Each structure stands twice: as structure tokens, then as C-alpha cells.
Image: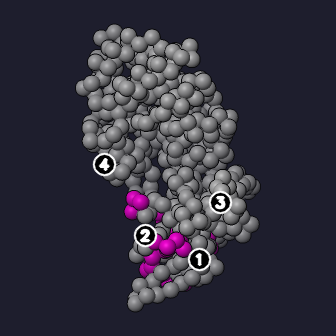
Amino acid sequence: MADSFRYENDTLYCEQAPLADIAARAGTPCYVYSRAAILERYRAYDEALAGLPHRICYSAKANSSLGVLALLARAGAGFDIVSGGELYRVLQAGGEPGGVVFSGVGKTPAEVEYALAQGVHSFNCESEDELALVDALAARQGVRARVGLRVNPDIEAETHPYISTGLRAHKFGIDIAQVPGISERARALRSVSLEGVSCHIGSQLLDAGPILAALDIMLALVERLRAAGTDIRTLDLGGGLGVAYRPGERTPEVRDFVSQVRARVEGKGLFVMLEPGRSIVAEAGVLLTRVLYRKGNGGKEFVVVDAAMNDLIRPALYQSHHEIIPLRRSARPRILADVVGPVCETGDYLARDRELDNVLPGDLLAVCTAGAYAFVSASNYNSRTRPPEILVEGDRWRVIRARESYADLVRGESV
């Protein structure tokens, strides 16, 4: 959890705002983000590359709330997107299309046309067929599109298999052995300009070693492509740095990692792009929830709260760990319990067999490290309304997404 969250006199604060006050006024469940924590992490990346041609392209899929995107756009961030909808969000938030990189393995013709019309910086193409599609649609619009080839370097990322992306067994990227041939054929295309290579080997990496190993492979590939006549100017290393979900978990320090990247790329004549997402916003957010009931079933203890798997699916989907802490600490003995929600699924849990404070009905809890891949994965399962999102700045806060109403649940439907 970011330094912006701390206890003062046993009361949990986000920056200078008591979280219990936010919960009382905004209701629960709700997501709360720290403006200071988001900017501190973004600036750690950006400042570590100062003086080197670069752009930090925030990965919008981590948290695509307009308030978060606008905050980063004003700070000078570019954006990594994987859908036309994410591009629309970035533009609505004030992001510059010229700072947008369009990634993703399944871009549709409509999405490519939209991105070309808006003037995005470039496309990271993940197949030769996609390269041909971008060329054809760019010709139709009378523009020349900048493209990079997303390379699959066949590097093992020690992370959850669902978020590992750098092996030949995964759907992402072009096999590195095929890249020289595709690069040569791409030079014959009239409406694309192949200027870059990119890679992204996975997410939630607690060791930067595999990313740096991939970087060494990519730099060797750049030299090979340049020698063959392809003018590679841009290297996109993707994102993937992990964050601490458990107390004491060791994670790469952003500035140290970027300094190692910098040492390898300086003097290579490359414009460097990084696409961090989780490592910018995850620790900057919490999910606030209220205890509804306590119950015991044959020696098993349950804490029933008003947040559920539809609000935060990561524990059910990835068996992921999120620390759960009280908004007001007490001296009561701790308990061992499952923290579960109201959704009618046995898999609806936020924690299992977790030691936590001996909370009572009405008490408030914070589910930590919930700024990334949390609200963006929320749903209306069981016809539950999605929670609001709140951005804190100092001792002030504002709602950047309103809580959904029952009317929102059926908007667009008909009988």
C-alpha cells in the first residue's frame, strides 16, 4: 500500500482525508484513489529517463477511469491502449492522440480505422495479417501509419499463467525468428512505416531480471534489423513491474529498474517507450467495504461484507491476495475468517482463512492494493450496481465516477 495511506490515532487516512468520513458520505462499497501516489509513481518512471528521448505510456487497461486518465494526461503521460473504447476514454480525458500506442492481439478493422482517423502515434502489430490490414486501411484514408512489431522473445516470466505473455505458447506477439522476414516484407508496404519493435512478457513481475533479459534480446534484434536495412527508431519495452500485495513482499524499485534500462539503451539512437500500468496505480487505491454480518458454520468463521466478486474479481479469478485492514483499529483479539460478499457463488470471496481484526457488523474495512485491474473488471453480476470511484487530493476528495443506480442496470434494454 502506498505511503499515502496511513494510520493516525488508529484511524486510516488517504493523504489527509479520513477514509471513514469518505465511506460515511459516499457509501460502500467504493473505490478510493490517492492523487499523490499515482503522480509519484508516474514521475519515478519519467524522471529516471530525463534527458533521454522517451515516453511513458500509461497502460489504460489497469485503470481507465476518466479522472485517473486526465490526471496522468495533465502530468504529460502518453497512453498504451488495447481497444477502440480505451482510445475514446483517453481522448475524452484530454489525452493527446499523438501520444497513444495501440497494442493488442485482436484489433478490429473498425478500431484501426478509428485510431487512424484520430492520429494515434503508432500501432504495435502482433501478426503479419494485422500489418497488412493497417496498411490497407491507412491507404484508404490517405495516411501513412507508424507501426512497430510486437515481438515474442520466448522469455519465461515468473508470474501467474493468466498474465504471462512472453512465451511461444501464448497468443501475444510475433515469434522472434519470424521478425526479420516480416520486417523485410513490410518495407514493401506503401502505407505503413515500420519504425519500431516492442515486447511485453507479462505482468506482476517481482523480479526485473526477465524484463532486462528481454531487453538485451530486443537490442540485438534492433541491430540485426538495422543491418538488414530497416530503420528501427523506437523500442517499446512494455510494462510488467509488480507491486507488493502481501506485507514484506519484495518488489523492484522503479527508479533502479529504469536506470538499468537506461544504461543499456543510451547511445543506441532509440526513442524508448515504457508502458507501466499496475505499478503506477495499484498501490494508490483501496476498496472500502462495510461488514454486514458475522456468522459461524461448524467452526468456520465468516465475515460477510457488502463488496463482492463483481466489485473485485481478482481473488476469485487469480486466487490473488489483498490485505484487508480496518478503517479504525481496535484492541479486540484477532480472528481467523473468510471475508465473503453477497453474490450467490461459493467463489465470491475477498479472502480465505485470513487473520484479521475482530470486526463487528457496521465496521468498515479497506481492501488494499486495489487501484489496478479492480474496478475495470467490475460487473453487474447478480444485478448489482457498480461502486463509485473517488479521487483524494490532500484533505479534499471528489467523486470521479458516480455509483450506478437500478436504472443504470437496464439502460439500453427493452421488453
Label 4 sits on residue? 158
Q: Nearer the viewer, mark 2 or mark 1?
A: 2
- In the picture, the disc for residue 347 is 2
Colour setting: one colour
Give the CA distance from mark 2 to mark 1: 18 Å
Residue at (28% x, 18% y) in the render:
181
Q: Nearer the viewer, residue 243 or 346?
A: 346
Residue 334 vs residue 147, the one in the foreground: 147
Find disc 1 in the rendering and name its residue: 291
Q: Which mark is residue 409?
A: none
Q: Residues within 10 Å of mark 1 (few under 14, many from 20)?
A: many
Q: Is residue 305 visible?
A: yes
Q: Secondary structure at mark 3?
A: loop
Cα distance, mark 1 to mark 4? 36 Å
User: Label 2 is placed on what type of residue?
Assistant: Gly
Query: In the image, which residues are magenta?
Result: 317-345
Residue at 45%, 15% in the rendered image: 193
Q: Is residue 68 left or right of residue 183?
A: right
Q: Nearer the viewer, mark 3 or mark 1?
A: 3
**Residue at which label 3 appears:** 415
Task: Work out how far the residue at label 4 is from the one at label 3, CA to CA, in angstroms.
Answer: 49 Å
Marks 3 and 2, the one that precedes in the sequence: 2
In the rendered structure, are the residues bearing label 2 and label 1 in contact, judged by CB atoms less than 8 Å apart?
no
**Magenta stretch: includes residue 320:** yes
Instruction: Specify the amino acid type for callout 4.
Output: Glu
